[in-house]
Image: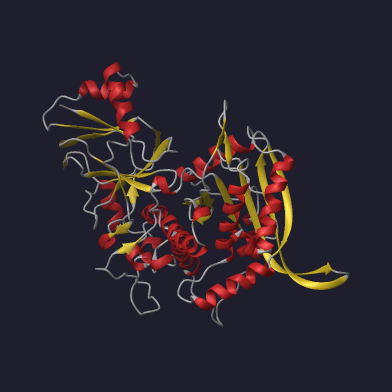
Amino acid sequence: MATQVVMPKLSPTMEEGQLARWLKNEGDKVSVGEPLAEIDTDKATMEAQALTTGVLRKILVQAGATVPLGQIIAIIGEADEDISALLAQAESGASTAANKQSIEAIVESGQDGAQQELAQVVPDGARTQATIAGQPLKGEAGAPATASSAQTQSAPTDKEAIATQPAQTAEGGNGLRGNGGRLIVSPLAARMAAEAGINLQTLAGSGPGGRIVKRDIEEAIKMGDQPAAQTQPPATSGASAPSAQSAQTFQESSVEGASPYRDVPVSTMRATIARRLTSSIGPVPHFFLTTEIEMDGVAELRRKFNEQDKENKISINDIIIKVAAVALVRHPQVNASFQEKVVRYYERADIGVAVAIEDGLITPVVRAADAKSIGQISHEVRQLAERARSRKLQPAEYTGATFSISNLGMLGIDEFTAVINPPEAAILAVGAMGPKPVVRDGEIVVRQLMRVTMSCDHRVIDGATGAKFLQTFKQLLEQPLLMLL
């Protein structure tokens, strides 16, 4: 019996998915649990897997398209089965009550838990070919070529020809990775390379572990554009130079009118960020509290800790996470969220730590940070941040925080305000720590100062409540031994 394949719900916050690429072609046989397509969710790239055995009869959504949860994206059935009724139903958007119930069950269950997260390891240049109308060209990926693709391959553009020249790495290689010659590529970089016709095996990744990321593709595209401007032979003594008039004409024409631009489709992650920020800064009544903290005691604590354990060094941010968690337990009114008819108070401090990744921002969560040592927090944060940047976080690892911290101090930002991540009631924006002159006991001395700003949801936190929390937070940072009381 023919079965509809729908866009599944792959994370708790997912409302739509972008179909990155199909792993099967129409007419291919598929088995239960076999990967069908790669789906870009708001936080990670996942595999949509087949829930039935049969033949992929029809692909209804092409690669690159973004569709809402539950929309039919393909049909699986027997090779000779009549699927005209399902096709008509999909095209009209109609659905029987039984089918609708089935689709909703699949969407809510994430296809019975069959979806597995991608490690984004690309074997043997499988995603190095350009795409036409969303279909991969015939190449190492094994996808069939179309007439257009054959023409493209027989007459490559200058950019494609340049991109296929091996790029030497620092080790003298040609961009190949270890582990059997596999490439580690971010989803966005893979799509950009496919669209630009760039062979990923010619690139040396600048990301963690040699991962090929967006900037590597942009650099390759930029290098591919340069020779086009160098096609004229260099001027010799006998060659005539361009006249001043022609140079002036070129300059004037090159800046005429509005600036050129290029449109890049909004990624699923960026669309989710935009949607959630809109739902936060508007409906959530923000107010902001700022204080300045002497960090000399924390700096000394960190120095002593790292002298004792040079293998597992801690950061200032690790201490800030611990102190915030302790302060939250002492001020449960801040460790809360507005739930329309109730205010929910949490019994432990689950701290979301903002991590910048290639496509946007994600907040992996340190669970029960109030009960963990600073060393444990440090180890966990490093692991979560690494998994976040490689888009390997599971939904349970980035949802359900009770309070968030965003630290831009390492980028030299002295002070900023952050937008609350609903349903949390507060977020702490941490600025840079640096030496500044201050007056102490009538004398000017130099202290390590840091400014923090807490954004508060006024439906949950009043001004005095937020101020008392920051007062405790400040005291604990200035005198870390108070955490032991």
- Residue lying at the far front of the rendered structure: 485
- Residue lying at the far top of the rendered structure: 97
- Residue lying at the far right of the rendered structure: 442
> Taking 29 as reference, is 112 left or right?
right
* Front-lying residue, 188 or 41: 41
Q: Which quarter of the picture shows residue 217?
A: bottom left
- Quick one: quadrant of the C terminus? bottom right
* Image: 446 above or below 361: below
Residue drawn where x is 30% and y is 59% of the image = 122
- Quick one: quadrant of the N terminus? top left
* Front-lying residue, 126 or 68: 68
Residue 234 rendering spot, x and y as whole percentages? 51, 76
Residue drawn where x is 30% and y is 27% of the image = 103
Residue 251 rendering spot, x and y as whole percentages? 65, 60
Q: Is residue 172 visible?
A: yes
- Residue lying at the far bottom of the rendered structure: 237
Q: Which quarter of the picture shows residue 24?
A: top left
Q: Which quarter of the picture shows residue 420?
A: top right
* Front-lying residue, 154 or 118: 118
State how the image is colored: secondary structure
